[in-house]
C-alpha cells in the first residue's frame, strides 16, 4: 500500500538543492541547519553600567548620557535618577568593543572634569 511518501514536494527539493550547491551530501538536513546556526550566531552583547557616587553632579551625569549614549535630556534624566536612587543603571547594550569603548570614554571624560564617576560593563 503506497501512501503519499513517494511524492516529491518540489519546494522541498528546491530548498535541498539550494542548500546543497556546494556539492556536499545533505544527509537528513541536520548538518545544513547546524552550519546555518553557527554562521549566523550573533556576537555577545554587553550592558554599559553607570555607578552612583556621592560626588559627581547630576547635571554632569546627564551630560555624559547625552554625549556618549545619544540620549534625549528626558531619557538621560530618567537614567540618571535611576542610578542615583538604585546605585547602578544601564546606559545601553552594545557589542563588547563598543561597550568597552563607551565605558572608557565616560570615565576618561569624568576624570578630565575631576569627577569620580564610574562606568563598567557586564554581559547582557
Image (tube, helix red, strand yellow):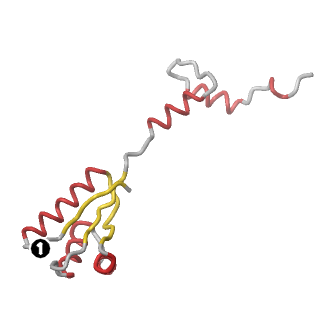
Quadrant hosting residue 54:
bottom left
Is residue 23 shown left or right of residue 61?
right
117 up-or-down from 20: above or below: below
Residue drawn at (59%, 22%) of the image: 26
Is residue 13 shown left or right of residue 77?
right
Give residue 61's position: percent from left, percent from top. Answer: 21, 76
Give residue 122's position: percent from left, percent from top. Answer: 32, 57
- Are there few (<14), some (14-19), or many (20+) residues within 10 Å of tag 1? some
Quadrant hosting residue 3:
top right
Give residue 36's position: percent from left, percent from top. Answer: 50, 35
Is residue 49 shown left or right of residue 44?
left
Residue drawn at (25%, 61%) of the image: 120
70 up-or-down from 100: above or below: below
Quadrant hosting residue 47:
bottom left
Q: Callout 1: helix, strand or loop?
A: loop
Residue at which label 1 appears: 115
115 up-or-down from 1: above or below: below
Number of residue marks? 1
Give residue 65's position: percent from left, percent from top. Answer: 25, 71
Amino acid at each position: 500500500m503506497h501512501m503519499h511518501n513517494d511524492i516529491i514536494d518540489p519546494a522541498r527539493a528546491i530548498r535541498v538543492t539550494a542548500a546543497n550547491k556546494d556539492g556536499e551530501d545533505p544527509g537528513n538536513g541536520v548538518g545544513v541547519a547546524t552550519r546555518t546556526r553557527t554562521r549566523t550566531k550573533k556576537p555577545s552583547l554587553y550592558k554599559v553600567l553607570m555607578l552612583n557616587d556621592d560626588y559627581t553632579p547630576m547635571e554632569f551625569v546627564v551630560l555624559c548620557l547625552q554625549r556618549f549614549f545619544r540620549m534625549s535630556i528626558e531619557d538621560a534624566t530618567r537614567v540618571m535618577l535611576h542610578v542615583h536612587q538604585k546605585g547602578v543603571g544601564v546606559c545601553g547594550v552594545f557589542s563588547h568593543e563598543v561597550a568597552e569603548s563607551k565605558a572608557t570614554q565616560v570615565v576618561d571624560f569624568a576624570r578630565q572634569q575631576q569627577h569620580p564617576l564610574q562606568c563598567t560593563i557586564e554581559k547582557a
